[in-house]
Amino acid sequence: MPLPILALAIASFCIGTTEFVIMGLLPEVAADLGVSISSAGLLVTGYALGVVFGAPIMAMATARLPRKPVLVGLATLFVIGNLFCATAPNYWLLMAARVFTAFGHGAFFGIGSVVAASLVPRNKRASAIALMFAGLTLSNILGVPAGTALGEAFGWRATFLAVVGIGLISVAAIAWLVPSDVAEPSGGGLVGELHVLGKLQVWLAMLIASLASASLFAVFTYIKPYLTDVSGLSRATITWVLLLFGAGMTIGNIIGGRLADWKLMPTVIATLLAMAVLFVVFTKLGAIAAVAVAIVFVWGMLIFIVVPPLQIRVVEAAAEGPNLAATLNQGAFNVGNAGGAWIGGLAISWGVSYANLPLVGATLALLAVAVAVLSQSLDRRAVVQA
C-alpha cells in the first residue's frame, strides 16, 4: 500500500482517539468541571451530533477545492479542536470545542476514503480504505487505553494535549506524503456531488451502514451491565474484554478489505447474516462467561468486516461525485450509533432484559440484510437490462 494511505491512517488514529477517549475520562472531567457524570456523558453525544451535521456542511464547503489541502485543513482542524478541549475553562466551552472538532470527522473519512481508493488499482480499493480505517480501530486498542491512563495520572487535559501532538504528526505526514494532484474533484463541483445523491443505490448503501451500526450500538451501549449481570464477569475484567473487542475490530477491518475486493455485496450480506446469528447465540449462551468473551471478540471482527465494503460501495455508487456521498456515509454510521443506543434503551424501558437485548441487535442486522439483498438485486437487474 502507498505511504500516503499510512499518513491517512495516522490521522484516523488521532480522530478515533479524540472521539472515544472521553468515555474513559468522564469521572475526571466531571469532577474537574463540577458537573455530573451524566452531563459529562453528553460530551459523547455532542461529538456524534457534530459528525452528523458537520459532514455535509464540510463536504459541500470543500467540494471544488483540491483534495490534499482539504485533508491537511481537516487534520489541522482536529489539532486546533483538541487544543481548545485541553484548555477549555468550563463545561460549555469544552462541549463547543468537542462539536467544533467533530465537524471535520465525517468529511475527513469521506474524502480520505476517496483519496485512498484513488491511490491503488481498482481490485485493491477496499483494502486501501481498510488500511486507512485501521488507524480508527487501533485507536480503540492503543489510543483510548493509553489516553485514559495518561488522563488518570496527569489529568484529563494532558490526554488532549497528547492527541494534539499526534495530530501535528498526521498533518505533517499528509502534507509530505499525499500527492498534490490526488483525486481531484469532478468538474461538476458541488452540483455534481449533489446530483449523485439522486441515485437509489447511494441511499441504500447508507441505510445499510446505519442499520449495521444500530445493530451494534443497540447492544454494545449496554455491554457492561450485560457482561456483569448476565455473564457474571467482574467490573475489572470488562476493560480487557473491551480491548479484545477492539482487537477483533482491527482484524475484521483487514479481512473486510480483502473480502470486499473479492466479492463486495456477498461479503456484506454474509457478514450481516453472521452477526444476526451471533446475536441469537449471545442470547442463548451469554450467561457462560467464556462463551460471552469469545462472542465479543467475534462480534468486533464482524462489525468491522462490513465497514470497508460499505464505504467503497458508496464511493462506487457515487462515482461521478463521490466526496459528498462518502462523507454522508460517515454521518449514516453515526446516525446508527445514536439510533441504536436509543433503540436499545427503549427496549430496556419496555421490559426487555439484558439477556434478551441481543435479539434487538439481531432484528436490526436482519433489516440490514434485507436492504443489502434489495441493493444487490437492483444491481443484477441493471446488468440484465444493459
Image (tube, rainbow, N blue to C red):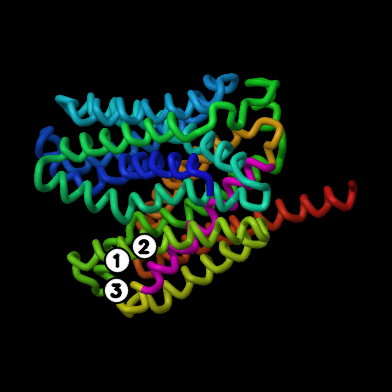
The alpha-carbon separation of the residues under discs 1 and 3 comes to 12 Å
Q: Nearer the viewer, mark 3 or mark 2?
A: 2
Instruction: State the image quarter where residue 51 is shown.
Output: top left
Mark 1 or mark 3: name the one nearer the start of the chain.
3
Q: Is residue 282 left or right of residue 24?
A: right
Of circles 1 and 3, the one toward us is: 1
Lateral position of residue 267 relative to residue 341, left or right? right
Report which residue position mark 3 lands on.
231
Find residue 348 and report its horizontal and vertical position in percent. Answer: 36, 58
Give the answer, above or below, for where 283 lies relative to 304. below
Front one among 259 and 85 = 259
**Residue at point 50% right, 58% down?**
254
Looking at the rendered structure, the kind of residue marked 3 is: Ser
Tell me where residue 163 sits by quadrant. Answer: top left
* Vertical comparison of 182 with 152: above or below: above
Q: Are marks 1 and 2 in contact (CB under 8 Å)?
A: yes
In this rendering, the answer to whether 258 lies above or below 313 is: below
Q: Bin the neighbour count of mark 2 within 10 Å (Cα to Cα): few under 14, some 14-19, many 20 and up.
A: many
Q: Residue at x 24, y 25 (%)?
A: 84
The disc at residue 245 is 2
Q: Amino acid at mark 2?
A: Phe
Q: Nearer the viewer, residue 290 or 277?
A: 290
Q: Secondary structure at mark 2?
A: helix
> Magenta stretch?
294-316
Taking the magenta stretch, the answer to whether it contains residue 301 is yes
Residue at point 37%, 31% (across, down): 172
Could you say where residue 371 lies in the image, as x and y percent from the top left? 65, 53
Look at the magenta stretch and give its main secondary structure. helix
Residue position marked by numbered label 1 in the rendering = 241
* Chain-order first, disc 3 or disc 2: 3
